[in-house]
Amino acid sequence: MKIAEAAARSGLSIDTIRFYERSGLLPPIARGADGMRRFSPETADWLRLLASLRETGMELRAMRRFAELYRQGDATIPERRRMLQEHAANLELRRAALDRCAALLAHKLQRYSEIEGG
């Protein structure tokens, strides 16, 4: 698939995909006779994972490390699992903080409605 389709499938912009390629986050991308990038379904899946990691706040440095470990093969699964578990734990902490903030905002909005309503 061409880069536009890979972008649509992953939710990443074309520029971000090119940046990730330059940053070493992607495996080597094949090119067609026309010189255009050709993304495999596996690379498209990898892009979706990268998009999810980035959207949930994983730093580029950690994403690079994860990609490096992935390229090293199955022997690195324990470290990759540890990285993802740590990231998931951080997400849970952030979710709890967001829930507290949302509850406070809901309380404030309710209070304003009460004041305005009389």
Image (cartoon, rainbow, N blue to C red):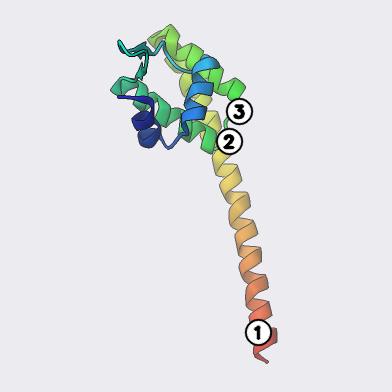
- Left or right of 7? Residue 112 is right
Q: Which mark is residue 59?
A: 3
Residue 79 in sight in this render: no
Q: Earlier in the sequence, mark 1 or mark 3?
A: 3
Residue in front for this viewpoint, 40 or 60:
40
Please state which amino acid type lies under the numbered disc 2. Gly
Few, some or many C-alpha atoms within 10 Å of disc 1 (few <14, some 14-19, many ≥20)?
Answer: few
Q: Position of residue 44 (x, y in %)?
A: 35, 26
Picture quarter containing residue 47? Answer: top left
Residue lying at the far bottom of the rendered structure? 118
Q: Is 84 rendered above or below residue 101? A: above
Few, some or many C-alpha atoms within 10 Å of disc 2 (few <14, some 14-19, many ≥20)?
Answer: few
Q: Earlier in the sequence, mark 1 or mark 2?
A: 2
For disc 1, the marked residue is 114
Q: Position of residue 97 (x, y in %)?
A: 63, 50
For disc 2, the marked residue is 57
Quadrant of the image containing the N terminus:
top left
Please state which amino acid type lies under the numbered disc 1. Glu
Residue in the image at 60% along x and 45% along y: 94
Residue in front for this viewpoint, 36 or 77:
36
Q: Secondary structure at mark 1?
A: helix
* Contact (Cβ within 8 Å) of mark 2 with mark 3: yes
Mark 2–mark 3 Cα distance, whole angstroms, equals 6 Å
Q: Is 25 rendered above or below residue 94? A: above
